Image (tube, rainbow, N blue to C red):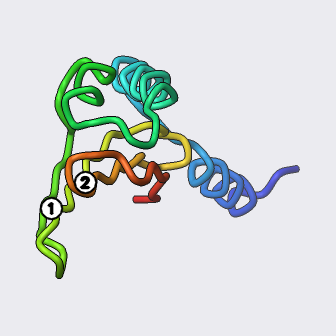
Amino acid sequence: MIRPRAIALAALLLSSACVIVPLHAFRAAERNQERINRVRIGQTLAEVERVMARGPERRSTRLRYDGLSIEEWSYVTDYVHKSDTTITFVGGKVVEVRVVPW
């Protein structure tokens, strides 16, 4: 006979391992990842926007100590692992593409 406490514990453990994401959001993240795979170091802001087919989901900008602009564009790319991909531009060109956890 299975105890109610064991059932509750099993339900709790299983629910913490599940990620429930609407299908349209999951597919949008997959499309973002497919497009980001085509982004290359040295591309300009306009080239990346063309590759991504839209602007960033999140954007931040600042000036570096030497006056060059630093801009970061972020897109959700993986709901299962809860991560975004951030594209960093320095002086208007891609210098880094990295995965960032939430």
Q: Name the residue under label 2.
A: 72
Q: Which residue lies furthest to the right in this view?
A: 1
Depth check, front residue: 6 or 84:
84
Q: Does residue 41 lie above or below 7 as drawn? A: above
Which residue is label 1 attached to? 69
The image's mark for residue 18 is none
Q: Is residue 34 left or right of residue 84?
A: right
Residue at the front extreme, as displayed: 66
Residue 37 point in image, percent of width and height: 51, 29
Task: Say which element carries label 2.
Answer: strand
The kind of secondary structure element at disc 1 is: strand
Q: Identify whether 83 is placed above or below 66.
A: above
Given the image, on which type of amino acid does mark 1 rest?
A: Ser
Seen from the viewer's position, the closer of residues 42 and 74 is 42
Q: Of circles 2 and 1, which is in front? A: 1
Q: Which residue is drawn at 18% across and 74% down?
A: 64
* Residue at image location 49% in from the left, 39% down from the top: 78
Label 2 and label 1: CA atoms lie apart by: 10 Å
Amino acid on which disc 2 is placed: Glu
The vertical placement of 25 against 68, above or below, is above
Residue located at (17% from left, 77% from top) = 66
The foreground one among 61 and 43 is 43
Is disc 1 surrounded by few (<14), some (14 to 19) or many (20+) residues within 10 Å? Answer: some
